[in-house]
Amino acid sequence: MRIAVVAFDTRGGVEPYVALATGLQRAGHEVRLVAPEDAEAMAGTVGLPFAPLTGSVAAYLGRSTGATERGTLASQRLAVREMGLRIAGWTREALAAFEGAELVVGGIGGMVVGLAPAEKLGIPFVPAHLQPIGAPTGAYPGVLVATPGWFGGPGRRLGHRLTELALWMPFRGAMAAARRDLGLTGKGRPTDGRPVLYGFSRHVVPVPPGRPPRHVTGYWRLPPAAGWSPPAGLREFLARPGSVVSIGFGSMVSEDPAAMRDLVQAAVHRAGVRAVLVAGWGALA
């Protein structure tokens, strides 16, 4: 089967989909990754055909240093502004990248830019998430909204519903405009009834059965680079007695990476542990 895997996010939200795509490729499918230009080198290292979406997520974040430090609302405004300006163009690029595909797979970022092109081409879209999205339950809270514990199961279910609203509301207007740009009418529900994939362990999040069918597959991870081994200094550090904590901020950026490092080091000393600091994209010096 010819499959397009579409992902739009920072590295942490793209690399798992590269791993998923390589797994599909090993299973005998013809797979293409559709993702921001940043991901081209990553796709190349595993021999994955690649179709770029114009622009660099790292560059967008670099222009918005400190938004995440100012809180959730500031981060959401940044996402709405940056993606709202570009969703129409990315949607047209995805339309070209999906040509010839028989199936499209993607998570939230991929759905934002990929749902309308898949519908336009009449290609089924299978959601594939890194979090328990779209699986409301009273067993655990929503990913983004946690209600007070005394609300019990009904409150946790409400948290899942509110999470869905929080995920989609910021992009709804730009997605609707992109649909109109492709000549589509109505709201469109190209994923209705199709299975949903979850890229984490069922032992970590026991997603309940439901409709549409839900498949918790385990984590989507790339193997270590061939020939890589930890530096000698890191091996020696980890071999010493005592707890070690890894601290990083992924693809976040910071207004003052040195101050963030100092804050983390002070916390490490207060906790009485040793730490490995992962600099990432610039939150931490």
Image (cartoon, rainbow, N blue to C red):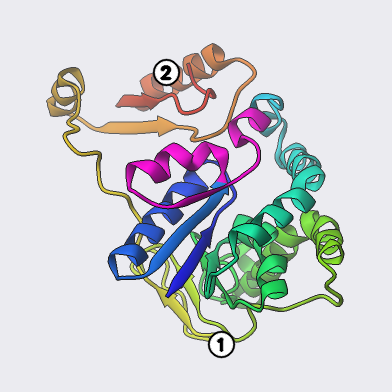
Q: Position of residue 78 (x, y in %)?
A: 76, 38
Between residues 127 and 271, which one lies in front from this camera angle?
A: 127
Which residue is the site of mark 2?
265
Residue drawn at 65 percent across, 83 percent down = 192
Magenta-colored span: 36-61
**Mark 1 crowd level (few <14, some 14–19, many ≥20, 10 Å Cα):** few
Between residues 160 and 226, which one lies in front from this camera angle?
A: 226
Looking at this view, name the residue that lies furthest to the front.
Answer: 100
Q: Label 2: state its secondary structure.
A: helix
Asked whether, in this view, residue 130 is left or right of residue 53, the answer is left
Asked whether, in this view, residue 76 is left or right of residue 186, the answer is left
- Magenta span contains residue 45: yes
Please tell me whether residue 124 is drawn above or below residue 203 in the rendered image. Answer: below
Disc number placed over residue 211 in the picture, else none: 1
**Mark 2 crowd level (few <14, some 14–19, many ≥20, 10 Å Cα):** some
Residue type, mark 1 in image = Arg
